């Protein structure tokens, strides 16, 4: 009976791991990285992102996420943020910033401090939170949580926010 219980627990654990989407790849040293299977570039460097956005006249998309503990964050990442539609939509108009608040994943002290300061600055009350800034750093859109929208629905809602801010 103990063997059966142990195998059952192991099987349930393995099944749970199989359903967790892979995390979005972010290389803090290089400042940007490609998400698996797409041409999406993300950075963890908020200040550099704002400078690039201003210089290149792009918007900034901030993703406040709990990559290793937040089920809606994982779902948003797997469904929208790593999709081809999102890659096409963002590639020429956005600088993408990954602001992660992990519980188990290691993170350097400078990133932890930056992200804690930004959560306070933007009044983050839930995860995931997506914030869109114009090229001057002014907030023009925000979504808190993720309700399972498909990539085209997510994009349409953000486009509506952008249009309303003009």
Image: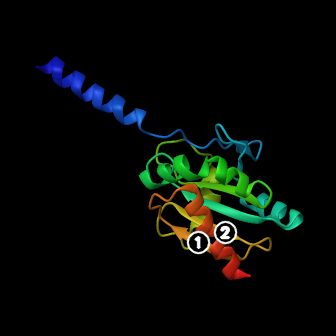
Which residue lies at the image location 56% right of the left edge and 62% below the top edge? 153
Q: Is residue 45 visible?
A: no
Q: Which mark is residue 67?
A: none
Judging from the image, what secondary structure is the residue with disc 2 in? strand
Sequence-wise, the earlier of marks 2 and 1 is 2
How packed mark 1 is, by other alpha carbons closer than 10 Å (few <14, some 14-19, many 20 or more), is some
**Residue 14: percent from left, percent from top:** 35, 29
Q: Residue furthest top?
A: 3
Image colouring: rainbow
Q: Relative to 51, does residue 36 appear above or below in the rendering?
A: above
Q: CA distance from mark 2 to mark 1?
A: 6 Å
Question: Is the C-beta separation of discs 2 and 1 under 8 Å?
Answer: yes
**Residue 1: percent from left, percent from top:** 10, 19
113 with respect to 5 (left or right): right
Q: Relative to 81, does residue 143 appear above or below in the rendering?
A: below
33 with respect to 108 (left or right): right
Q: Relative to 95, does residue 134 appear above or below in the rendering?
A: below
Which residue lies at the image location 71% right of the left edge and 57% below the top edge? 89
Judging from the image, what secondary structure is the residue with disc 1 in? strand
Which residue lies at the image location 68% right of the left edge and 41% below the top edge? 38
Residue picked out by circle 2: 132
Residue picked out by circle 1: 142
**Quadrant containing the C terminus in the rendered view:** bottom right
């Amino acid at each position: 009976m103990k063997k059966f219980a142990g195998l059952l627990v192991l099987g349930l654990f393995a099944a749970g791991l199989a359903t967790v989407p892979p995390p979005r790849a972010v290389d803090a040293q290089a400042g940007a990285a490609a998400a698996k299977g797409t041409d999406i570039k993300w950075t963890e460097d908020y200040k550099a992102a704002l400078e690039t956005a201003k210089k290149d006249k792009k918007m900034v998309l901030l993703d406040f996420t709990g990559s290793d503990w937040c089920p809606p964050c994982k779902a948003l990442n797997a469904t929208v943020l790593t999709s081809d539609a999102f890659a096409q939509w963002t590639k020429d108009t956005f600088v993408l910033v990954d602001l992660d608040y992990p519980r188990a994943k290691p993170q350097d002290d400078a990133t932890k401090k930056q992200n804690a300061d930004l959560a306070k600055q933007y009044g983050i009350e839930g995860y995931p939170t997506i914030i869109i800034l114009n090229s001057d750093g002014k907030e023009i859109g925000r979504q808190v949580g993720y309700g399972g929208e498909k990539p085209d629905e997510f994009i349409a809602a953000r486009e509506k926010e952008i249009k309303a801010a003009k």
